[in-house]
Image (tube, rainbow, N blue to C red):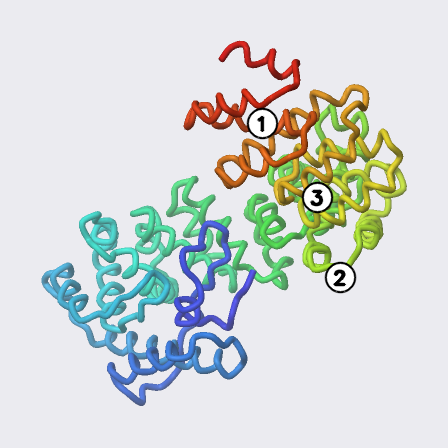
Amino acid sequence: MVLVGGCLVYQQIYHRHVYATQLALGVAGEGKATRSSHGKAAEDLVKEARANPGGEGPEEQARLKKADEAYRAEAQRLLAGMTAPADFPAALAKELEGWAGGDLGHAEPSPRIAALMTLWLRQDPAGLSAWLGDENFRGREEVAYAHLGFIAAEALRNGEIDQLATLMKGDKHSSSYARSFAAQELGQDLNREQLLAMKAALPEEKWNDFSMTLVGYTPQSKSGELTDLAVAENLPRLLTRFAQMHDQGPWLADLIGNPALSKAFREALSDDHVSAYSLLQDPRVAPERRIPYLTPQEKLDPYAALAESDAGSLLGDWAYRLRTGQATAEEALAGVKAGTPEVAEQAPEELRRQVLLQLEIYAPEQALAAMSDLPPEERYRTALLAAIQGQMASPEVFLEILQQVPVDAPDTYDRRLDAWSSRASRDYERLGESYVEWVRGLPPGVDRDMALATAAKQAQHSNPGLAADLRGEVSDPKLQHSFSGH
């Protein structure tokens, strides 16, 4: 997770609607700049920050932070002397007439709009929530995104938890933005009193959403403080979500095995379905701590099951080097073995097979080269599975992988047809006529017939005439017999 010094302008320039994955940047702590300029100057600083949005170096971040502090200071100045208007919607409508707005994530915040909305939240949170949720209000999402960061920070600074919770229970857009901005503020300081007040103010479903967002913004350096809070208040889900969001499987495994924690709390950690994912997918966690989470069928050969997940987890680190030819398949295999030594010792052949299968995703050509070194039957099994499951290989590389298996190899006909079905279901829709042309250009034989038959099946609904023509080109009697229903 990326947190940059806390600059709202930085967030708005570089990020859009990314709260669902908990990767959005958020709002900083309160701006402490003394007021040396009034409204227009603050907006000018924001515009100046937007003039060069491409850099992320220290100077650029400092400039953006300065602009954000100026915006906040001006909004606070306006708020301190503001009298509530008789009609908040009308007052805001007037301000919005002069607001430039912009695309979501790029709209420049207005100090006056922020101050008005903050005052409205204090006096009538339900009214503000309804206004932001009005489907006839064009631009409401941009308004919420641009200004709720300041509003959430002010509400927390003044202990207005119930008012902020009202926003978090409202319209889906305003509630998600309010949740995310509030979560960053609370996630970084873990104010226990405010967190418990928020939990009390939100329905369980909303609290679960909030806590998931919160731990995404909680720095790893505060894991001890978060643990103390979770244990004291019996909130184990905070810890399982923290482990998930920060890729901390070993940390979670240590908590589950920590005898200093109560048995009931450790069981709650262990039984959470999120724990199963966090631990199973993390090769850094010892196998004996992961095996209990396998299915009964997987437990029959547990190291083979772990080999599949570990190959997928560890090969991702090699993806770029494999694609660019900076590493070989054997180097990637050695790297995977080093990342999961116990699995490599207990299930070496299965780990190798899984690496080759998944290499087809990252580097099909290298997978093809590596398969050539396998014993024949193992090469056939691996090639067929790679051809069926693979998505990244071009049709040409797919065919090369498939042709590692002789057409007369025993017990491979149906799997070969499955591979062609998988390819046709992907490439007929994706490539259209060019895929059909490629299929028709294949040399006569079983592969061409299977390719024609499976392409015909894909074309049957959208182009029955083409489907009939393709079936007419098939010479394999077994495939011709399967057309009897047409």
Residue 464 at x, y percent in the picture: 43, 23
Residue 351 location, quadrant: top right
Mark 3 vs mark 2: which is more N-terminal?
A: 2
Which of 226/293 is in front? Answer: 293
- Residue 360 image label: 3
Give the CA separation, mark 3 to mark 1. Answer: 24 Å
Q: Position of residue 34 (x, y in %)?
A: 35, 86
Asked if residue 397 lies left or right of residue 411, the reply is left
Residue neighbourhood size for the residue with mark 1, other residues' Cα within 10 Å, grouped as few (<14), some (14–19), many (≥20): many
Q: Which of the 4 image quadrants contains residue 384?
A: top right
> Residue 218, how many percent across, how many down?
55, 59
Q: Nearer the viewer, residue 430 or 176?
A: 430
Quick check: 363 above or below 431? below
The outermost residue toward the bottom is 36
CB-based contact (under 8 Å), mark 3 and mark 2: no
- Pick the residue in front: 415 or 75: 415
Task: State the mark number for residue 173.
Answer: none
Whether residue 260 is visible: no
Spatial distance from mark 3 to mark 2, Cα to Cα?
16 Å
Q: Nearer the viewer, mark 3 or mark 1?
A: 1
User: What residue is drawn where x is 16% and y is 71%?
Assistant: 83
Q: Are marks 3 and 1 in contact (CB under 8 Å)?
A: no
Report whether residue 44 is seen: yes
Q: What residue appears at the point 25 percent right and 49 percent down from the top-left corner?
A: 133
Which disc, if any, is residue 452?
A: 1
Residue at screen point 40% across, 54% down: 179
Label 2, on which residue?
Answer: 326
